[in-house]
Structure formats: structure tokens, C-alpha cells
Amino acid sequence: MKKSILIIIIISFSILAYGQTGKFSGGLLFSPEINFYEAENNDKKASINYRYGLIGEFKINEYLYIQSGISYIRQTYDIFRSYNGCAFNPDEVYPAVITYINKNDYSIISIPIQLKIKKTFDDSKFSPFISLNVNNNFHLLSKYYSDYDSNVDELKDVKYFGNTGNIGFGIEYLLCSKIKMNLSTHIRIIEYRKKDPIVYEKEDQINTFNNVGLSISILYVL
């Protein structure tokens, strides 16, 4: 986690220190995503979520770009899992497991680091690109709903950290001399995050190809 934050700081200072006219772009990001997951009963399910955020892009040369920024995503899963009652009421004594959860709701702040490799054609507004992305995800708030439809207490102290790695393919379109649009699809190739501190899980989650999405960003060239 500390190494990831250090990398982000270095990139940010590099952009500020060496940013020149035409080398830096900034704008907005929107990304609908589908997450595939598996409940305790091995039932395969899908969840549709939406990512919103700010994005900055630094041009290294005609082919290479570095992107970073910050985005917010709220992930909701209808999933059947057991939980420890002590986690919700630490001052009281409970048996190891007292009931079950049928819905998890996570609020996540994500800081991506992305390498974009672009091919530019002469006299064309379209430029295809490939992107390699690492998302540093901070789980800030989790909310759980029990199987008898009552709202469990909101837990504001549930905080943990995770990483995901994505590969993407897209097209950049130059709307005018100063504004460009990126449209791409991406797929998660690896995920790591610590165990949910409330809901029991067998092991740290390391999943591949369990997330696909469509990213749309509008950038203004400075």
C-alpha cells in the first residue's frame, strides 16, 4: 500500500514539474462495469456497477501516455454468507455465527495508474490504443443486510485495501484541437484484496477475468 501511494505521488509531481503545453490533459471519466462473483452455494451471479471520476493524462512521447486520477465506485452484491455478530456489537457476547447476510454494499475510492500505448495515423482523428492498468482500491465503507430484510448497522470503521490489474483496448477520437474522447473496453486479469473483516471468506480473493467494463472519458488538452 505504501509503495503504491509513493508511486502515485512521484507521478503527480512529475506531471507538475515537467508538464508542458500539449503534454498534459485532464477531464472526466465514466465507466459502467459488470462484476462476476460466486456465493457460498457456488451460485454464479453478476453485479452491474458504475464508476465516476477525474482523470489526468501525461504524454511521454507520440506513443506512450501515463494516466492517473481518482474515481468512486459503489459495488453491491446479492450474496449469501455467514457473519460474526461480534463484529457488529463488539461489547456483547455472541456465538461464532448468528445469522446470514444476503447483500453486501461497498463504497470504494480508486486511484488508477495506467500505461496507454497509442498508434496515431496521419490526417485521422481516430487513434487505437492498448492500456495496462493497476487500480489501487480503498474500501472506505461497507454496509450489510441480513437475510430477514432488516438493515444491519452501518460500519464506518471497515477499511481495507486492494489492487486490481486490467488490460484494455480502445479508440481515442479528437473532437477538436483541444478536446478528445477515449472509448475503451477493459477486462480484469487479476485481483487481490484482503478478507472482508466482517463476512467470512475462505481466503484472500485472487480472481481472474471476473470483471469487464466500458470506459468513457473526455479530456481537455492543456
Image: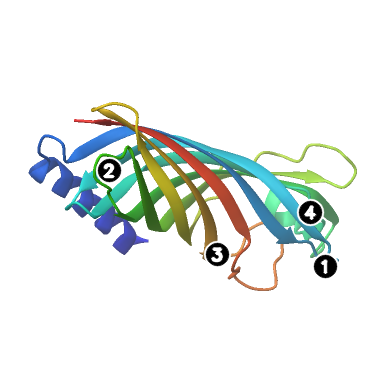
Q: Distance between the residues labelled 4 and 1?
A: 10 Å
Are circles 2 and 1 on residues that touch, CB within 8 Å? Answer: no
Q: Nearer the viewer, mark 2 or mark 1?
A: 2
Kind of element beneath mark 4? loop
Q: Is residue 158 above or below residue 149?
A: below
Nearer to us: label 3 or label 2? 2
In the rendered image, residue 8, in percent from the top left (x then y), is placed at 28, 52
In the rendered structure, which amino acid carries the disc numbered 4?
Answer: Ile
Nearer-N-terminus badge (2/1): 1
Of 191 and 168, nearer the camera is 168
- Tell me which residue sits at (17%, 44%) in the image: 15
What SS does tag 2 mark? strand
| Label 2: how many Cα within 10 Å (few below 14, some 14–19, many 20+) | many
Q: Residue 79: which disc?
A: 4
Residue drawn at 32 percent across, 46 percent down: 68
In this rendering, position of residue 101 left or right of residue 7? right
Crowding at dot 3, Cα within 10 Å, few <14 / some 14-19 / many 20+, comes out as some
